[in-house]
């Protein structure tokens, strides 16, 4: 039982991180109907900015305070992501309003390569580390309930907490504020939103900024775990099954989809793995996504696809 | 419609021409709209009515001609610009935000009037909250006015067609526009719903003094509620005047009865 719980919790925590990346996809898709292939590149770009600035800033200012350096680096990285969001809107999206979905998809694919390239040109292409002082050592919990207790990775736990906090504040922002309402309006119908005086260009910049911040948070968490390297760019692909599962248009879907896939990966690896020779974790999510595409293409929480004949 | 006083010319359209590739949707069309009047644009299918409305609303930019709104040139505005200039519109095929509640839909109409910045909204800070409540009060007035209290929390996508049309009108009214553009407000409605809609249009015009430009298929309805009517056919203006004048116009009669062109 203790072992099962341990696996389950581990799954939930890594699932939370998938949710975070998936959230970036969903935000942009909802607000602009664009499937943003550049989300992974944004994670890498943000993580690179964070890693490098936290390295450079102490040198520039001649100080030796890790915490302060990290706070400053975070602030600078946020600004960098805002600039990226603004540039993407200004240079690419603005000219593609009301174009076919495929056109926009290709545009984001292009943006992904540009971000990958520019990011590594500016910040370098080695492996960098982000040290935000996450505790690395695991802790034992519930020792009185189970024999031997449950081993929990503190780093994962904190990461999951941060992700949960971000998700909650974003949902409140979307549901309760006037800007959130305007965002949802644009997501529903560009034309109508414009005609009632919602400025499309500004809304898109806001959405990409928010997606940039989720990318930054995801980048910091993954980066401090695995090191900042090019492969961060491909973690976005791990979030693809999550969006398919949860539905591209649903914020709660992204969260629950992420959790299901996180848990599913871990449990299947542990309990099914031995029968098929292991390695399930890598493809389990895609398998699940395929099943969903066959039987429920709109995902768990997505809007039902109805075609008018 | 006697006894009501119209104001100055509020909207003046001069020699508007619009084409899509080889299709001439509008050819050299001029007419004006007086303040506080109800102005109808009618015509058979494909006459260019919707194109005309989309030109006024900034969705299409005419290749030629000028749009003068309260003495200012507006031929190059987009639909966001039209909204800031005090024009609101409804849509023929209803373009509501389907996932959102009726209340939220109407609240989006207040967007331009909201001044609190995003940071204040994000932390639900004093001015943002006060503002939200003020706008909410205004929206409740509109909800009462259009008699849709009972559905205010319902997601719009679940409402029947006639009510959706009413919410569409409510959202436009929430903008407190000077000019309200209605794209076939009565299309697809049953008799009772049509009567309700007529009453609302007349009330809006009467109580708020809103100038109304409407497109309509249903000749009977139009003649009853409009002050002046423009008739389009194949992108050309073939009639302009009071309902009675238009009704007596031989060109209009032939267009509607399908006589030889």
Image (cartoon, coloured by chain):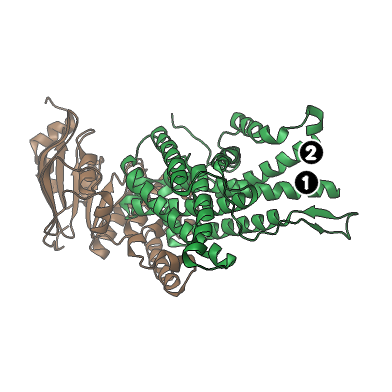
- Dot label at residue A120: none
Chain name for mark 1: A
Q: Quadrant of the N terminus of chain B?
A: bottom left
Q: Position of residue B127 (x, y in %)?
A: 42, 73
Q: Earlier in the sequence, mark 1 or mark 2?
A: 1
Colour seen for chain B: brown
Q: Position of residue B94 (x, y in %)?
A: 37, 45
Indicate left or right for A240 with A109 as reference. right
Indicate left or right for A226 with A117 as reference. right
Circles 1 and 2: CB atoms closer than 8 Å: yes
**Residue B103 occupies quadrant:** bottom left
Q: Which residue is mark 2?
A: A270
> Which type of secondary structure does the marked residue at label 2 adopt?
helix
Q: Residue at x 42, y 40 (%)?
A: A114
Q: Position of residue A287 (x, y in %)?
A: 66, 31
Q: Quadrant of the C terminus of chain B?
A: top left
Q: Residue at x 29, y 62 (%)?
A: B176
> Which type of secondary structure does the marked residue at label 1 adopt?
helix
Indicate left or right for A140 with B225 as reference. right
Q: Which residue is mark 1?
A: A7
Q: Nearer the viewer, residue B23 or A93?
A: A93
Q: CA distance from mark 1 to mark 2?
A: 8 Å
Q: Residue at x 20, y 41 (%)?
A: B42
């Amino acid at each position: 039982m203790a072992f099962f719980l341990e696996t389950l919790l581990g799954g939930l925590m890594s699932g939370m991180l998938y949710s975070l990346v998936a959230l970036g996809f969903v935000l942009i898709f909802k607000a602009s109907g664009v499937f943003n292939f550049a989300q992974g590149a944004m994670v890498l770009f943000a993580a690179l900015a964070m890693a490098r600035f936290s390295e450079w800033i102490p040198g520039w200012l001649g100080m030796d305070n890790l915490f302060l350096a990290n706070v400053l680096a975070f602030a600078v990285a946020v600004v960098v992501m805002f600039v990226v969001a603004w540039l993407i809107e200004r240079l690419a999206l603005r000219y593609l309003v009301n174009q076919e979905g495929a056109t926009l998809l290709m545009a984001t694919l292009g943006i992904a390569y540009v971000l990958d390239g520019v990011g590594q040109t500016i910040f370098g292409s080695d492996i960098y580390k982000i040290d935000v002082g996450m505790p690395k050592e695991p802790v034992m919990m519930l020792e009185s309930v189970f024999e031997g207790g449950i081993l929990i990775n503190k780093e994962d736990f904190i990461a999951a907490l941060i992700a949960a906090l971000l998700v909650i504040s974003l949902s409140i922002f979307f549901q309760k504020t006037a800007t959130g309402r305007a965002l949802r309006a644009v997501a529903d119908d560009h034309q109508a939103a414009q005609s009632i005086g919602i400025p499309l260009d500004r809304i898109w910049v806001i959405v990409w900024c928010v997606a940039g911040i989720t990318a930054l948070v995801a980048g910091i968490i993954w980066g401090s775990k695995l090191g900042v390297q090019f492969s961060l760019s491909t973690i976005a692909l791990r979030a693809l099954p999550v969006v398919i599962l949860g539905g591209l248009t649903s914020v709660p879907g992204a969260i629950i989809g992420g959790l299901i896939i996180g848990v599913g990966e871990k449990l299947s690896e542990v309990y099914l793995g031995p029968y098929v020779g292991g390695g399930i974790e890598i493809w389990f999510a895609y398998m699940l996504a395929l099943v969903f595409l066959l039987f429920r293409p709109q995902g768990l929480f997505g809007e039902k696809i109805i075609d008018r004949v | 419609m006697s006894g009501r006083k119209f104001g100055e010319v509020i909207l003046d359209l001069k020699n508007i021409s619009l084409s899509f590739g080889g299709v001439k949707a509008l050819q050299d069309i001029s007419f004006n709209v007086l303040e506080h009047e109800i102005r109808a644009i009618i015509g058979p299918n494909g006459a260019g009515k919707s194109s005309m409305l989309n030109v006024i609303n900034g969705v299409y930019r005419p290749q030629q001609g000028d749009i003068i709104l309260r003495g200012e040139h507006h031929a190059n505005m987009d639909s966001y610009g039209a909204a800031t200039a005090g024009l609101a519109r409804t849509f023929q095929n209803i373009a509501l935000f389907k996932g959102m509640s009726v209340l939220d839909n109407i609240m989006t109409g207040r967007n331009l009037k909201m001044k609190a910045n995003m940071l204040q909204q994000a932390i639900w800070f004093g001015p943002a909250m006060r503002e939200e409540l003020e706008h909410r009060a205004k929206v409740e007035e509109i909800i009462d006015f259009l008699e849709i209290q009972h559905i205010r929390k319902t997601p719009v996508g679940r409402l029947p067609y006639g009510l959706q049309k009413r919410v569409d009108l409510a959202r436009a009214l929430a903008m407190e526009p000077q000019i309200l553009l209605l794209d076939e407000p009565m299309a697809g409605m049953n008799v009772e719903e049509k009567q309700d809609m007529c009453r609302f249009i007349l009330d809006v015009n009467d109580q708020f003094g809103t100038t109304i430009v409407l497109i309509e298929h249903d000749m009977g309805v139009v003649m009853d509620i409009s002050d002046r009517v423009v008739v389009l056919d194949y992108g050309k203006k073939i009639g302009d005047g009071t309902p009675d004048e238009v009704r007596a116009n031989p060109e209009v009669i032939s267009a509607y009865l399908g006589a030889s062109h």
